[in-house]
Amino acid sequence: MIRPHPAFWRFVFGLVTCYTLFMVYLLFQSADGARQTLKHLYPELGVELDERHYGTDCALYKPGQGINWEVINDTVFDEFVVAHILGWWGKTLMLRDRTMLWIISIGFELMEVTFQHWLPNFNECWWDSWILDVAICNNLGIALGMWSISYFDSKEYDWRGMSQQPSLLAKARRSLLQFTPKSFSNLKWQAFASPKRCLQCLFPIAVFLLFEVNHFFLKFVLWVPPSNPLNPIRLFLLLGVGLPGMRECYEYIEASGSPQGADMLKLGAFAWLGLALALVETLVSIKFGKGMFPAPWPTHILIGWGLAAACGLTLFTVWSLRYYSRQHAGTKAKAA
């Protein structure tokens, strides 16, 4: 990472490391002790949350009253809609692949359905989840992100040194360019190029979804309201570790599929730090959530995921057998 400067990314790495160590510290506290620790940062914390239920009234039309504008306005003009779009814009800058992004987008909505019996915040109306969130907000964020990548990728840059710029305006423009990535090209993850590649791409997808779910579980178990500054601070830290971390993960996957990339087969420091942070956050959520989620797993959730796992495993097995049998047949034909 050379933009804006290697020292900048070392600083980001240090910040994320400090956050990870802070989460490790919280992990060894009691639930009440961890909440009181956060109260030293923001005195208004340490109070049990009154979680907002988004799915209490899902009727878009009420007989005799017409369109339910009150519910529509409260949902569409929610304070977090813009943050939702910007969040997906940031995710797009990290992954730079529509297929991967849409898998995560749909996957997170499935996570909401899966855990809505534990987290009231996940209890949303169907049109809120699939139309407003997926079809509009996520789609708009992904489109803006891909447009940003395409625009800056096709733009011509003058990377000459500051002293070689002809005017003061050019020097100012060059100084701003220093804070942009050196390359804006798309990352061709090719998640369905082969069974092996598919499994490799499923790993960063799983980590992405883990961070997404951790965000809501951590808020719930640590009693951090959505409006608290700790939430955007965490998201900015994740963006800082995610931008280089996803690039390192992509390069690792690319190197593993190339005979010439054997010497590069090493996962980068940012990727390892991101994995460590995801693990620690998950452990914090599990430890402090003990006793907070008494509701049993709904039967339809267990059956749904069981059927999905069985179908997915069957399809993947058939695909793998056909793919590698064709590959083996092609190798034998070339040898003959």
Image: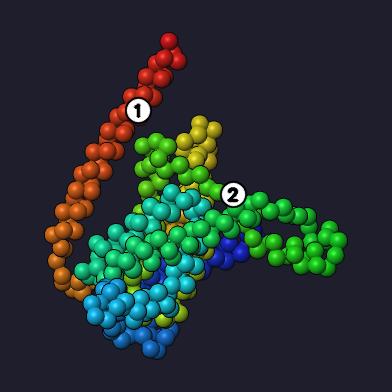
Label count reads 2
Determine which of the numbered discs, if any, sits on residue 185 in the image: 2
Q: Position of residue 53 (x, y in %)?
A: 28, 77
Q: Is residue 73 visible?
A: yes
The secondary structure type at the circle numbered 2 is: loop
Q: Nearer the viewer, residue 72 or 7?
A: 72
Q: Position of residue 263 (x, y in %)?
A: 53, 37
Q: Nearer the viewer, residue 120 or 54?
A: 54
Real-space CA distance between mark 1 and mark 2, rounded to the nearest whole angstrom: 31 Å
Judging from the image, the colouring scheme is rainbow
Sort mark 2 into few (<14), some (14-19) or many (20+) by Cα contacts within 10 Å.
some
Determine which of the numbered discs, if any, sits on residue 324 in the image: 1
Quadrant location of residue 289? bottom left
Q: Does 267 appear above or below 238? A: above
Residue at x 19% of width, y 58% of height? 301
The amino acid pointed to by label 2 is Ser
Name of the residue lying farthest toward the front:
64
Q: Position of residue 332 (x, y in %)?
A: 39, 16
The amino acid pointed to by label 1 is Tyr
Sort mark 1 into few (<14), some (14-19) or many (20+) by Cα contacts within 10 Å.
few
Residue at x 33% of width, y 24% of height? 325
Q: Does 250 appear above or below 291? A: above
Label 1 vs 2, first from the N-terminus: 2
Residue at x 42% of width, y 37% of height? 193
